[in-house]
Amino acid sequence: MAVMDGCESKKRTPVLKEIKCPQCGEEIEVFLRDSFVVEDATCPECGHVIHEGEKH
């Protein structure tokens, strides 16, 4: 179904977003899919980990 592939693949593609670290406020880059974190991201300042599966 090549016609519908554009819509479906757009939903599967992760989006890069910067969020504030809940510990220190530093910006962290995370990949989101449907508002959920796709892979763990670590704050470069304090080491806090945003875990895969968290909603943002």
Image (tube, rainbow, N blue to C red):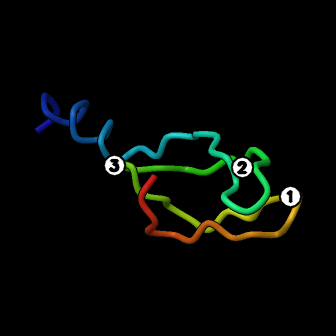
Residue in view at x 49 percent, y 59 percent: 37
Q: Position of residue 47 (x, y in %)?
A: 82, 69
| Mark 3 neighbour class, 10 Å CA radius: few under 14, some 14 to 19, many 20 or more | few
Which label's residue is closer to the chain start, 1 or 2?
2
Three-letter code, disc 2: Ile
* The quarter of the displayed image where residue 4 is located: top left
* CA–CA distance in space, label 3 to label 1: 25 Å
- Give the distance between the C-alpha atoms of the residues marked 3 and 2, in whole angstroms: 18 Å
Name the quadrant of the N terminus. Answer: top left
Kindly identify which residue carries mark 3: 34
Q: Is residue 7 left or right of residue 19?
A: left
State the residue position of label 1: 44
How far is disc 1 from disc 2 in space, using C-alphas?
A: 8 Å
Q: Secondary structure at mark 3?
A: loop
Residues tagged 1 and 2 counted as in contact (Cβ below 8 A): yes
Whether residues under marks 3 and 1 lie with C-beta atoms below 8 angstroms apart, the answer is: no
Q: Amino acid at mark 1?
A: Pro
Please name the residue shown 70% across and 55% down the image: 21
In the displayed structure image, the side of residue 16 where residue 24 appears, left or right: right
* Marker count (numbered): 3
Earlier-in-chain disc, 3 versus 1: 3
Q: Residue furthest right?
A: 45
Q: Residues within 10 Å of mark 1 (few under 14, many from 20)?
A: few
SS at mark 2 in the image: strand
Residue 5 is situated, as x and y percent measured from the top left of the image, at 21, 36
Nearer to us of marks 3 and 1 is 1
Horizontal side, residue 19 vs residue 13: left or right: right
Mark identifier at residue 28: 2
Which numbered disc, 3 or 2, marks the residue that appears first in the sequence?
A: 2
Q: Amino acid at mark 3?
A: Asp
